Amino acid sequence: MTLRLLPVLCLLFTAACTLPGGGLRPAANSAPPADAGGKGGVDGLLVGHRLMEANEPELALKAYYRAAAETGIDADVLSAIGSANLALGRLGQAEQVLRRALERDPGFVPALNNLGCVLMEQGKIPEARNVFQQAFALDSGASDSIRENLRLAIARMENPVYSDPEEVQEQEAPNLKLVRRGHGEYVLLSAL
């Protein structure tokens, strides 16, 4: 009697695993489907950008490294890696990677903007101002975020704070934040 039920159980199992359109259901933790180009999965840059928006820079960095391995290293990938390092507070690494991005493409506006953000965080305000001016000129002033970054750098240069080291009490560092706005565009926000 058990042998007669085996074909019926196989048929029911197959039906349970089949979608209404006839395809098999993927397992809950299976890999994403390959894209139309057949490269094998979701674009690592896109995943990284979404993770940065979700405030997950460590995971975004891994996605950017995957993108570099899959598609090669270009200014866009290097700029993304640099912005993730900046979000993680790794300013030296971020600066180094962003400068490499600009070696590959000196006119890559997102890398210039991100480098300016790193330089601001490091207190290198004059250099940050120059970098933001380059980004602003290359962008033809179209980006509000770059304009705001440049405005902030100019304001910090024009209003330096001088004080005697003995009189300086624990001052809170400016609350700067790198925020992604659209594809490859970042803005440095401040609580000022």
Image (cartoon, rainbow, N blue to C red):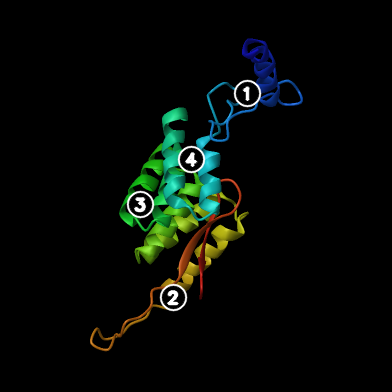
- How far apart in space, not on screen, are marks 4 and 1 (Cα)? 22 Å
Look at discs 3 and 1 and give the one toward the viewer: 1
Q: Earlier in the sequence, mark 3 or mark 2?
A: 3
Q: Answer with the quarter of the image where residue 22 lies.
A: top right
- Are there few (<14), some (14-19), or many (20+) residues within 10 Å of tag 3? many
Q: Are marks 4 and 3 in contact (CB under 8 Å)?
A: no
Q: Earlier in the sequence, mark 2 or mark 4?
A: 4
- How far apart in space, not on screen, are marks 4 and 3 (Cα)? 15 Å
Label disc, if present, on residue 76 of the rendered structure: 4
Q: Is residue 111 above or below residue 19?
A: below
Identity of the residue drawn at 59% across and 22% down: 37
- Are there few (<14), some (14-19), or many (20+) residues within 10 Å of tag 4? many
Label disc, if present, on residue 142 of the rendered structure: none
- Disc 4 on helix, strand or loop? helix
Q: Quadrant of the N terminus?
A: top right
Dot 2 amino acid type = Glu
- How far apart in space, not on screen, are marks 1 and 2 (Cα)? 52 Å
Dot 1 amino acid type = Ala
